[in-house]
Amino acid sequence: MHGSVTPRRIDVTHWRVLALALPMTLSHVTTPLLGLVDATVIGRLGEAHLLGAVALGAVIFDFVFWSFGSLRMATAGLTAQATGAGNAHEVDLTLARAFLVAGVTGLLLILLQWPIATIAFPMVGASPAVTDALSTYFFIRIWAAPFTLANYVILGSTLGRGRTDLGLLLQVAINIANILLTAGLVLVFELGIAGAAIGTAIAEVFGVGLGILVLRRLGSNPFAVTWHEVLNRAAFLQTLAMNRDIMIRNVTLILAFSIFSALGARAGDVTLAANAVLYNIFLIGGYFLDGFSTAAETLCGQCIGARDERGFRRTIQLNVGWCLGFGLVVSGLFLVGGGMFIDFVSTNPDVRSFAREYLIFAALTPLLGAVAFVFDGIYTGATWTQAMRNLMLISFAAYAAVLLLAGELGNVAIWIALMTFLSARGIGQVLLYPRLARKTFASLKPASA
């Protein structure tokens, strides 16, 4: 992609970083609503086993769908580099290849729904009441798989172009549809947990239709490229290799979160429900900071495409600074207002009381995870996917070690392990980054001469 590129400067300023990050900060804050709306609506019914079922359903779908969240990340990284190189045709080819992978993968997930359930349900170790409700939720929502994955592709394409405003529009539209459909189906039509699943699934279908319209308005037409170009061996293998590496990274990440929820489930319905509430606090904090990950992803990719090493390094400096600052603020807000959030999500007094005991752990996760969040974007934009994968595996080993060594501490050990996992990822990425950056820009210099 870079062979004929003339080096040029990418605009990297505090204002540009904020202009990219803040829309996606708002967008990422709305993203957990796909699970949080379901949890809140069901939580208002006052049944702990139904809230637990929705929480576990969200975890399973996080694992299943975000295992293929590589589609968003790889699409964003490749699109950013093509945009930085000024290659609009490559942007469309990247989009077409990703749509192909998303469609095939989504259909396979539908075909494999029973094996997935057979493996996943026993792993979470929930009570019979929770498992029965979870089954209803799972076998409805799984039918949205191709649309969920296509939404990842659409979002990645808009972010790689630096159009985080459109990413915000798409995410907000999907979540408004989800809120209206879920609340209506559960509270008005009294469809219970099935209504929550149907509402979320229909919202995903709506998102794909709107996303395709947005892409066309941007001038993209991924359906006009030829199959010969899409299936170009070298380019398609690169796409698959990146998706493989990020998929392993994502599976490891979601496996850590799944273990977190499963250990809570084994401790009882109240612990499961309380950790589910606090897990949403962690997600909101993470997605809030992920706006700077997106800004770093976009600008780092564009700087590499444009061969702008100075801009690349300034991108990292600005985004790390802003993300750490926001992490401190977000943690402070959760420490002050977390109790009100707990009361809003659950009406069960036992769940409320138990969740308050562990609020401090959830509140600190944004600060401890800030460096890992922003460097995820840096590594994605630079397409350092193999290094990202390896560092995630090392961090997971540290997470597992804490659980094994401190298991007798119960729920405290679960939260300490999660905090260790977040911190280890950030430390590893910081230590490896200088060598990767030198190698990347050294490889570009001969071609630009």
Image (spheres, rainbow, N blue to C red):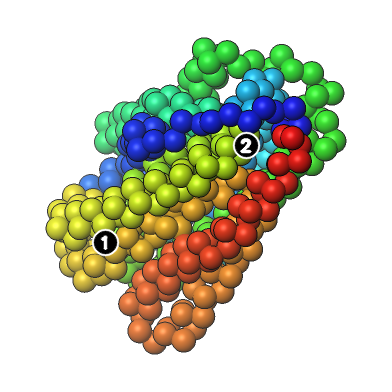
How busy is the neighbourhood of tag 1: few (under 14 within 10 Å), some, or many (20 plus)?
A: many
Residue 47, x across and y down, in percent: 27, 55
Give the secondary structure at mark 1: helix
Pointer 1: what residue?
Answer: 363
Q: Nearer the viewer, residue 4 or 51?
A: 4
Tell me the number on the disc at residue 307. 2
Which quadrant does the N terminus fall into? top right
Q: Nearer the viewer, residue 373 or 50?
A: 373
How busy is the neighbourhood of tag 2: few (under 14 within 10 Å), some, or many (20 plus)?
A: many
Residue 318, x across and y down, in percent: 39, 46
Spatial distance from mark 1 to mark 2, Cα to Cα? 39 Å
Residue 118 vertical position relative to residue 58 in the rendered view, above or below: below
Q: Amino acid at mark 2?
A: Arg
Q: Residue 370's quadrant in the figure? A: bottom left
Q: Is residue 112 left or right of residue 157?
A: right
Give the secondary structure at mark 2: loop
Q: Residue 166's quadrant in the figure? A: top left
Q: Amino acid at mark 1?
A: Ala
Residue 375, x across and y down, in percent: 49, 53
Q: Residue at x 69, y 48 (%)?
A: 442
Residue 59 vertical position relative to residue 147 in the rendered view, above or below: below
Residue 26 vertical position relative to residue 399 in the rendered view, above or below: above
Q: Residue at x 85, y 35 (%)?
A: 233
Q: Residue at x 58, y 70 (%)?
A: 394
